Amino acid sequence: MLSRPPKARLLAKVLVAALLPAAVALVLFGTLAHAVARRALEDELGQRLATAASGVAMQILPEQLAAIGSGDEQSNTYANLTRRIELARQRLGVRRVLLVARDLSGRGDTEGLVALGARAYELGADQPEIERAATGALAGSPLFWGRDGRPYQRGYARVGGFEPAGFVVVEGSAQYFAQLAAFRRWLVAGGALCMVFIAGLAGWLSRRMTGPLARLARSAEGIGRGDLTRPVAVETRDEIGYLAARLDEMRAALQARDERLQMMLAGIAHEVRNPLGGLQLYAGLLREGLAQQPERLAEVARVEREIGYLKNVVSDFLEFARRTPPVMEPVPVAPLLDEVCEICRFPAGTGPALRAEATPGLVAEGDRGQLRRALINLVKNAMVAAGVPGQVVVAARSASGLVEWEVRDSGPGVAQELKDKIFAPFFTTREKGTGLGLAFVREIARDHGGEVTVDRGPEGGARFRFATRTAPAA
């Protein structure tokens, strides 16, 4: 598939590298600051409520708690206790004051939620705080939410000496939550402003860096496609400029080596083709001379086949070494697929069925000759793999501004261990193969901005795919 522009990728990476640590640091700092502030406010309120409970407990005699129980609602002792805790609630400005015995049974409640002698089950969650209060320490409960949806806390103090007769529970509203919410909003707003500033600074710095790097990447991409004539511009004097200079030296060295290679291959082709032409001529004369000896003609045919194979090998080597950059032009897809099928189709009954599938009116942008060569190579391989009776499909479809080319067959497919090897030059599993067919396909796909892949197709065999751009509208 076609890749995104290198500049966009590099810019995104630089921005992520700058923003991600900053965002993580801000989130961690904000979370920690919020947690510390909440814990400090919660501890402060718990201590204040526990101190208030301790002051009320000093006014309660253990004997008073022991003297009343269920059914004593009309007693003077109960009336005195309820009046005393109500006055304490008003004086302290808290939500509720509750008296309970050691077993957490009610002995007085300013809210009337716990009846005299009934167990205060709501205090069960604060058992650790109750046990701490039983030792004489000030104990504040964790934050909890009341039935009205507001946050509250409780403070506990024991009534009595070493063996407490009960506890005073003072329940107050956690009004600090409003301040905490405001603090949280300030943290979010400050973090957002910091992120905007960091993003702007990182974007400006990254563009200063990624501009030369993107142009350097395009130059490297051109060198990879075989464009060795265009020099690499050295724009800066820093490490990027140093890299550009070394890249240009590499380009020049590759250009010189490529020229030497082409001259060498041209010489080899000249030296090999001349003897091959003579051998082919003599093989023809030998065939005419042995026309009266049919049993010898099979040997002549074998010689002619080997000569033809050597000529194909020489041609493939030359084409692979002298492959020119693609000339981009609009390429009607359907006619190209029909032409490929016409070239590769076997006579009826002698090979697998071959058909073309193309989106009507689809036009690709590319080099028609190179695309034709890539498809022919893929289709020929598929025809051999599918065998008789089998089927081969060459298809093209439009997808998100791209043309997706596809050749699939009903053969055995490509083994998993070979998928990374079949596109390497000179690798082949055939006795007479040169190993350059799929290497051609890969280079052509890359020259068009894509990458060829192989997987299992719907027919059960191999499916080769690559993508090119759709031709712009006229």
Image: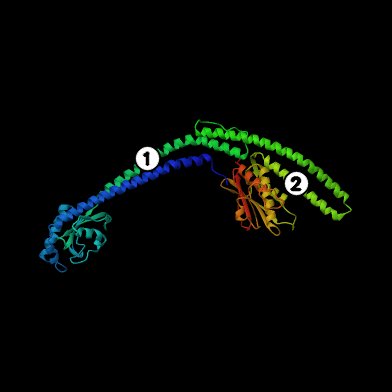
**Residue 354 makes an appearance in the image:** no
Q: Residue at x 73, y 54 (%)?
A: 346
Query: How much space separates mark 2 and mark 1, taking CA atoms?
Result: 70 Å
Q: Which residue is mark 2?
A: 310
Q: Nearer the viewer, residue 192 or 126?
A: 126
* Rendered location of residue 30, percent (x, y): 34, 45
Residue 145 spot, x, y in % from top left: 27, 56
Q: Position of residue 239 (x, y in %)?
A: 50, 34
Q: Residue 77 sits in which quadrant? A: bottom left
Closest to the observer, 345 or 167 = 167
Q: Which disc number belongs to residue 194?
A: 1
As rendered, which of 360 and 261 lies closer to the eye?
261
Q: How is the image coloured?
A: rainbow
Q: Left of 159 or right of it: where is 122?
A: right
Q: Amino acid at mark 2?
A: Leu
Q: Is residue 219 above or below residue 292?
A: above
Left or right of 368? Residue 82 is: left
Residue 294: quadrant of the picture = bottom right
Q: Amino acid at mark 1?
A: Cys
Is residue 41 placed above or below 166 in the rendered structure?
A: above
Q: Nearer the viewer, mark 2 or mark 1?
A: 2
